[in-house]
Image (cartoon, coloured by chain):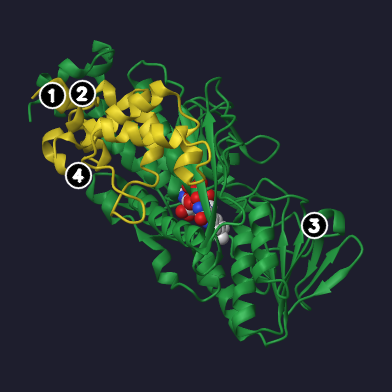
Chain colours: A yellow, B green
């Protein structure tokens, strides 16, 4: 497992509440640092809407870093955009868009 | 998947001591980290699940007196007959499956020095870190004549369940022509746009079912959340069925008389056929017992970790916390829970919680198939929350029906996502 896919694996575990991990993990404690850094806290906002079954809120699972970050940049740059995502994207720096896109893409990578 | 040792490579930045103390093998079960969460609502249920997911080896206990949770978001649709109350009910079964100990009990005291929680059932639990998400208590001392008994005649429906059904049934059995009165408290209170969403849906109900009736809103404020959007919708859709009276127009209600369903402003009294009192609120009583509420009745926190600024090792999230400009919403409670869980794990491993960017979106229905939204983006850089300038804002004014319908569909999507996050 590469470091990148491992990171994705853990992100998924936390996203699904570790249900799949079973007894094997019962005595293991600290999650990897990537689950605890700024990108994890940024992504916590996304899952407020983009979690659970796919609805009018699209699922972010399986989207690449490029797709996610392009979408965020497009929302951010469309100054006349009025959707919730336009209003949200304006609050994020390019560095944060990069960090959260990397984190979310890694979460889905191993599926 | 490799064993724990194989994964150490990714633990950049974790101290070896922290890892070994928290990665205790079975033989050292007595030193397992004890995390207790009080309140199984949007904040507490999310926090308990996240803590267990991040720290599978820790003992995570959720204390909640009710067997199931009744969600407030979308309950305004229930009040007006557009949704079943059953669609608001969520269970804790998934939390139990994931290894959270769900204690069906009420916390009656917290000793912040001994780090213990006393339960109504008699047990005392010790904690390393405590998360409080008790939501709001209605202030029964704030409006003369309004208490738990009179609320059975003049429903608040500001906690979902029997009160929601009561208001629904009163509206349903009201005669065509009856006046509906709603009173709105001063800020802060749970769900700032909630009263106006309810007003819109009640007006829609009256317009379609009881056209000779009308809703009068008596407000303790002059401004409210999403005001331009609600005002636009009301003028267009409900000009004959809804009247809003601001504080400056004598809208502030200071007393009620349940017997004749009358409310009193400074200069007037108004009698309604149905009277919905949304009373002033404060943090749930257990926050006072724990010593984390201040003179305002709410709980000051460090907004990076959501740790109380009054008591160490106790975190307060959700409606009970002082997080303005973040509103008291289910979206905010869910997000604060996730940020708080990450902060707690970092603190347990000797790391400082990091500041971040947070956001909130609240949808409100203005009719059965139309919704509007408010979005805010916040930073907690200096330990308190502030809005990121130039981000956030409202749905556009003068939008097409399809824009409003799209936001109604998003509202439904949000509800399934946030309830899946909290309850699985
Ligand atoms: C009509 C209405 C509409 C709303 N619509 C929306 C919306 O569209 N979007 C949105 O984001 N928000 C909405 N909200 C707001 C949302 O319901 C709250 O912000 C949210 O529930 C707050 O979560 P919480 O965890 O702080 O509290 P709660 O969800 O109220 O949970 C608190 C829990 O703690 C338990 N508890 C309390 N004291 C104790 C104790 N001593 N021991 C053990 N357990 C205890 C309670 O039983 C309860 O289960 C709405 C609210 C209302 C009233």
- Report the disc number at residue B23: 2
Q: Do discs 3 and 1 belong to a common subunit? A: yes
Q: Disc 2 versus disc 3: distance between alpha carbons?
A: 58 Å
User: Residue at label 3?
Assistant: B246
Residue B267 x, y percent position in the rendering:
92, 63
Say which element carries label 2.
loop
User: Residue at label 1?
Assistant: B4
The residue depicted at 11 percent of the width and 35 percent of the height is: A24
Q: Do discs 2 and 1 belong to a common subunit? A: yes
Task: Name the chain letter of the residue that bears numbered label 1.
Answer: B
* Vertical arrangement, residue B334 with respect to residue B181, above or below: above
Q: Do discs 2 and 3 belong to a common subunit? A: yes
- Locate the N terminus of chain A and report the quarter of the image it occupies: top left
- The reply to whether residue B166 is in sight is yes
Task: Name the chain letter of the residue that bears numbered label 4.
Answer: A
Q: Disc 3 versus disc 1: distance between alpha carbons?
A: 61 Å
Say which element carries label 3.
loop
User: Residue at label 4?
Assistant: A19
Q: Do discs 4 and 1 belong to a common subunit? A: no
Q: Which is more foreground, mark 4 or mark 2?
A: 4
Q: Disc 3 versus disc 4: distance between alpha carbons?
A: 50 Å
């Amino acid at each position: 497992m590469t470091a990148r896919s491992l990171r994705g694996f853990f992100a998924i575990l936390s996203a699904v509440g570790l249900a799949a991990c079973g007894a094997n993990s019962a005595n293991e404690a600290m999650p990897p640092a990537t689950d605890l850094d700024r990108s994890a806290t940024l992504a916590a906002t996304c899952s407020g809407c983009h979690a659970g079954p796919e609805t009018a809120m699209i699922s972010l699972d399986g989207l690449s870093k490029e797709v996610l970050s392009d979408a965020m940049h497009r929302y951010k740059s469309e100054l006349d955009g009025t959707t919730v995502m336009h209003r949200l994207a304006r609050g994020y720096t390019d560095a944060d868009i990069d960090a959260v896109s990397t984190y979310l893409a890694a979460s889905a990578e191993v599926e | 998947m490799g064993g724990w040792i194989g994964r150490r490579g990714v633990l950049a930045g974790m101290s070896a001591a922290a890892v070994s103390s928290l990665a205790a093998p079975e033989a050292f079960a007595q030193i397992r980290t004890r995390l207790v969460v009080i309140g199984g609502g949007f904040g507490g249920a999310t926090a308990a699940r996240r803590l267990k997911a991040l720290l599978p080896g820790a003992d995570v206990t959720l204390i909640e007196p009710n067997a199931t949770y009744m969600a407030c978001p979308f309950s305004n649709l229930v009040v007006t007959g557009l949704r079943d109350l059953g669609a608001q009910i969520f269970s804790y079964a998934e939390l139990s499956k994931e290894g959270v100990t769900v204690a069906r009990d009420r916390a009656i005291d917290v000793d912040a020095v001994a780090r213990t929680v006393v339960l109504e059932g008699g047990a005392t639990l010790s904690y390393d870190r405590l998360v409080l998400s008790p939501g709001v208590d209605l202030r029964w001392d704030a409006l003369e004549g309004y208490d738990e008994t009179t609320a059975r005649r003049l429903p608040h429906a500001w906690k979902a369940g029997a009160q929601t059904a009561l208001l629904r049934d009163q509206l349903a059995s009201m005669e065509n022509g009856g006046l509906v009165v709603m009173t709105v408290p001063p800020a802060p209170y749970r769900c700032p746009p909630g009263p106006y969403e309810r007003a819109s849906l009640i007006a829609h109900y009256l317009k379609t079912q009881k056209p000779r009736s009308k809703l009068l809103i008596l407000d303790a404020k002059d401004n409210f959340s999403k005001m331009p959007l609600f005002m636009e919708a009301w003028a267009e859709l409900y000009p004959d069925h809804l009247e809003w009276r601001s504080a400056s127009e004598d809208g502030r209600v200071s007393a009620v008389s349940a017997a004749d369903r009358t409310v009193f402003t400074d200069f007037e009294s108004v009698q309604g056929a149905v009277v919905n009192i949304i009373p002033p609120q404060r943090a749930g009583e257990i926050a006072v017992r724990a010593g984390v509420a201040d003179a305002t009745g709410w709980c000051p926190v460090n907004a990076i970790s959501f740790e109380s600024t009054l008591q160490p090792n106790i975190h307060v999230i959700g409606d009970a916390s002082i997080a303005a400009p973040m509103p008291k919403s289910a979206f905010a409670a869910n997000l604060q829970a996730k940020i708080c869980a990450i902060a707690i794990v970092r603190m347990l491993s000797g790391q400082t919680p990091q500041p971040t960017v947070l956001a909130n979106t609240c949808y409100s229905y203005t009719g059965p198939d139309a919704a509007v939204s408010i979005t805010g983006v916040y930073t907690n850089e200096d330990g308190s929350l502030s809005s990121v300038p130039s981000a956030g804002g409202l749905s556009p004014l003068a939008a097409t029906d399809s824009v409003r319908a799209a936001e109604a569909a998003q509202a439904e999507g949000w509800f399934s996502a946030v309830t899946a996050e909290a309850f699985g």
